[in-house]
Amino acid sequence: MGTCSLALADVPAQAAATAPATTTPTSKPAPLVYIERGTLPLIISAPHGGRLPIPGADVRTGGNFLIKKGKKNNFTMAFDANVDLVALQLADEIERRTGQRPYLVVANFSRRFVDANRTPEEAYESEPGRIVYEAYHNAIRTARAEIINEYKRGLLIDIHGHGGDPESIIRGTADWTSVRHLVEEFGKDALVGPKGLLTPIAAGGANKFNPPLDQLDALEVPSLNGGFITRQYGSYAGGNFDSIQFELGNRYRKRENIPPFVKQLADGIVPFVQTYIIDAPRTVGVLATTGPASTSQAAGPSDASPATKPAELLAP
Ligand SMILES: [Zn+2]
């Protein structure tokens, strides 16, 4: 990969999480948030695959959802099985190909205590939960700031699992708005063109995106079209840092299917990072801040959050 790489340095201390320098299992207890500082302009996040309880934290009840919305229409503690393994093995595959690693922010904590893909008011109901939530988001914010400083643009991929069609990968960009910078600068080709992010992943026909890649104007699945993380850290409200959510059907998350699948993911991700982030001219300014093209957002039980005003997206 290119010569523009970040120097390795110590990972900043985290309140509730430590970052081992290796993904090799050790006898040490797993941190509640697994954080790795990367050397590529890419963050891989997986907030819903953890199983560990958070000591001292209360199990979430959804009470704040009730207050906010009048019903528990967006509250779930569902576990996205094996998305942590997908994230870690994807990082390893990218390193095999490029010699460099993405940033990683992976939950080992259970969604029963903290949902890192929700606004703070909905994400936790206890102080220990707050600390872990902040550790997760501080890690993303730190990585994102480092990447923007070095590369002027970057990408976050938020990895989830859904319980619908097991063959389906549901794309979540809040209907292209979390990748607004990419679309405005390069067109939708950045995602679905020959060197786009998704095209090589779908090549051969084994991996099926929803919406299909050739349906450029099709709306995404309303309840799974990008949650808080995707909307908070993408270019929805401006800037050159984009984000996308992958909701993986069960087939992609079976243990035996993960090694070949992460190779297919890397087939799309590695050329994308090279072409659209590292090699692209860095003369662009920050895009004007305007609202998203579409804020349609049906309430659903999973990884979507209600449309958020741009001003809230820019809040720390
Ligand atoms: Zn999820």
Image (tube, helix red, strand yellow):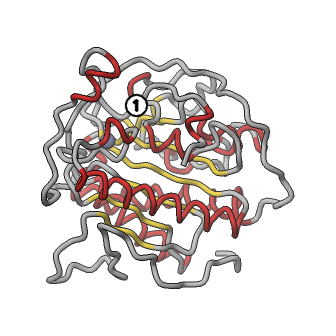
Percent coordinates x, y for residue 209 in the rendering: 46, 36
Percent coordinates x, y for residue 107 in the rendering: 29, 58
In the drawing, does residue 103 fall left or right of residue 146? left
In the drawing, does residue 155 fall left or right of residue 151? left
The amino acid beneath tag 1 is Ala
Q: For the point 48% across and 69% down, which residue is it?
A: 94
Q: Which quadrant holds the N terminus?
A: bottom right
Front residue (pair 256, 158) = 158
Q: Is residue 122 above or below residue 73?
A: below
Q: Quadrant of ligand 1?
A: top left
In the drawing, does residue 46 fall left or right of residue 139? left
Point out the residue furthest to the front here: 127
Q: For the point 34% across and 22% down, which residue is it?
A: 68
Q: Is residue 291 above or below residue 181?
A: above
Q: Report which residue position mark 1 lands on.
A: 304
Point out the residue furthest to the top here: 70
Front residue (pair 292, 102) = 292
Toward which corner of the image does residue 77 lie, by quadrant? Answer: top left
Front residue (pair 286, 82) = 286
Q: Secondary structure at mark 1?
A: loop
Percent coordinates x, y for residue 251 in the rendering: 26, 44
Toward which corner of the image does residue 304 lie, by quadrant? Answer: top left
Q: For the point 78% across and 42% down, which residue is it?
A: 287
